[in-house]
Amino acid sequence: MMVEVTIDSVRVSLMSQHRIVVLKDVGALRFLPIWIGPFEADAITIELQGVEVARPFTHDLLKSLVEKLGAEVEQVAITELRDDTFYAQIVLTADGRRLAIDSRPSDAIALAVRARVPVYVAREVMEQAAIVPEPDIEGSGTMLYPGEATPAEAPEAFKDFLEELDLSGLQ
């Protein structure tokens, strides 16, 4: 069973130059942070912001190749979390066949934003790694979304989690 997600935000660690893409469950208030490289983070952010680039990025090239070969990107899915590593698949249709291609989540997401296709996460992965923010500190029970709130308004538990991440050991 798969859970549809949207890209809530792409964040930069204040302690290092590592990036995190935060995926939000469409049907529930929970978030899935995935560590990604700076180039993939830039590729995702540039496309989300609609920035024009002089030359195509690798993910633009991939999309163009898929289309020129007569295939179509259907969706991408974060399929597994094993040994602290996320695994993904790009699902294509070509010549009436459905193909699942192994991918890093960051590359799959960068392609998904370009192809404007849905992103899914396996339910087991969400249950293992998703974060549910706490209600706001005023006790109103209102939940604030990290992508929509200013840093001062972000839910404390979620803000603390993102700020305290130790990303120094990532390559």
Image (spheres, rainbow, N blue to C red):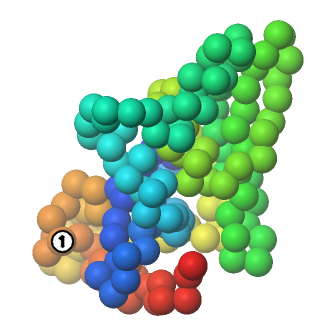
Closest to the observer, 162 or 24:
162
In this view of the protein, which residue sits in the foreground, 10 or 149? Answer: 10
- Residue 87 x, y percent position in the rendering: 72, 58
Give the SS element for disc 1.
loop
Location of residue 11 with respect to 119 vertically, above or below: below
Q: Nearer the viewer, residue 139 or 117?
A: 117
Of all residues, the one furthest to the front in this rendering is 55
Residue 83 position in % (x across, y down): 76, 78
Name the residue furthest right: 97
Q: Is residue 97 above or below residue 41?
A: above
Label 1, on which residue?
151
- Specify whether residue 112 is in view: no
Residue 33 location, x and y as percent?
49, 66
Q: Quadrant of residue 119?
A: top right
Q: At label 1, which amino acid type do we have?
A: Pro
Rendered view: 28 above or below 77: below
Q: Quadrant of the C terminus?
A: bottom right
Please tell me which residue is depicted at 82% across the width and 23% down the height of the picture. 98
